[in-house]
Each structure stands twice: as structure tokens, then as C-alpha cells.
Image (cartoon, rainbow, N blue to C red):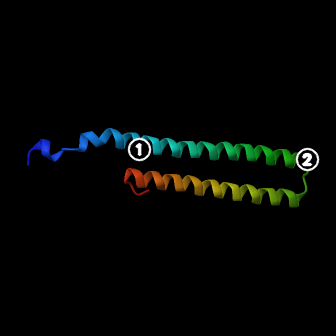
């Protein structure tokens, strides 16, 4: 088999695959940025709520809500990373 036969068809598909990989990577970064912005905004909202009401039970409840939001964000980021790994062909 000649060298040109070995790589035949690869170069034509490569730009398309690279652009798909970059698109998926960008989507993952966008999702992560959205999660971080959401958590920052949520933290600010919770801090504002706490500044007006410092009862221990409210602080505990709000801390639980924030933990739940962080866990959901982690799952979203993990899902984005897994999807990116599947598209690129790498197990994450």
C-alpha cells in the first residue's frame, strides 16, 4: 500500500472534524462559563438574603440550597466533559 493510500480521505475530513471538535469544546466552555456566572450570581443573592436575616436556621437552609446548586452545576460540567470526550474519542 502506498503512503498516499494509507492517508487517503483523512485530509479531506480533518478540517470538518477539527471544526466539530472546536465547536463542542466551545460549547463545553460556554456551559462552564454559564455555570460559574450562575453560581456567582446565586452567591451574591444568598449573601444579600443573609445580610437581612441572620437566623441560624436560614443560614443552614441557604447553605443547603447553594450546595444543591453547586452539585447540579458539577453534573452539568461533567456531562459537558463526557460529551466532549465522546466526540473527540477520548474517555474522560
Residue 52: numbered disc: 2
Which of the marked residues, 1 or 2, is nearer the chain's N terminus?
1
Q: Quadrant of residue 58?
A: bottom right
Query: How many numbered marks have been drawn onto this rendered protein structure?
Result: 2
Q: Nearer the viewer, residue 83 or 41?
A: 83
Task: State which quarter of the image contains the C terminus.
Answer: bottom left
Circle 2 sits in a helix, a strand or a loop, which is it? helix
Is 70 drawn above or below residue 41 in the view shown?
below
Residue 44: x %, y % from top left: 77, 43
Q: Which residue is mark 1?
A: 21
Q: CA distance from mark 1 to mark 2?
A: 47 Å
Residue 15: x %, y % from top left: 33, 38
Q: Quadrant of residue 5?
A: top left
Q: Nearer the viewer, mark 1 or mark 2?
A: 1
Circle 1 sits in a helix, a strand or a loop, which is it? helix
Residue 7: x %, y % from top left: 18, 44
Residue 10: x %, y % from top left: 24, 44
Q: Residue at x 87, y 61 (%)?
A: 57
Q: Residue at x 69, y 47 (%)?
A: 39
Q: Residue at x 41, y 43 (%)?
A: 20
Amino acid at each position: 500500500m502506498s503512503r498516499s493510500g494509507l492517508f487517503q480521505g483523512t485530509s479531506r475530513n480533518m478540517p470538518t472534524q477539527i471544526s466539530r471538535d472546536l465547536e463542542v469544546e466551545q460549547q463545553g466552555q460556554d456551559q462552564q462559563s454559564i455555570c460559574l456566572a450562575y453560581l456567582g450570581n446565586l452567591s451574591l443573592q444568598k449573601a444579600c438574603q443573609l445580610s437581612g436575616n441572620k437566623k441560624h436556621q436560614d443560614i443552614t437552609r441557604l447553605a443547603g440550597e447553594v450546595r444543591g446548586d453547586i452539585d447540579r452545576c458539577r453534573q452539568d460540567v461533567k456531562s459537558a466533559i463526557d460529551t466532549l470526550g465522546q466526540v473527540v474519542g477520548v474517555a474522560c
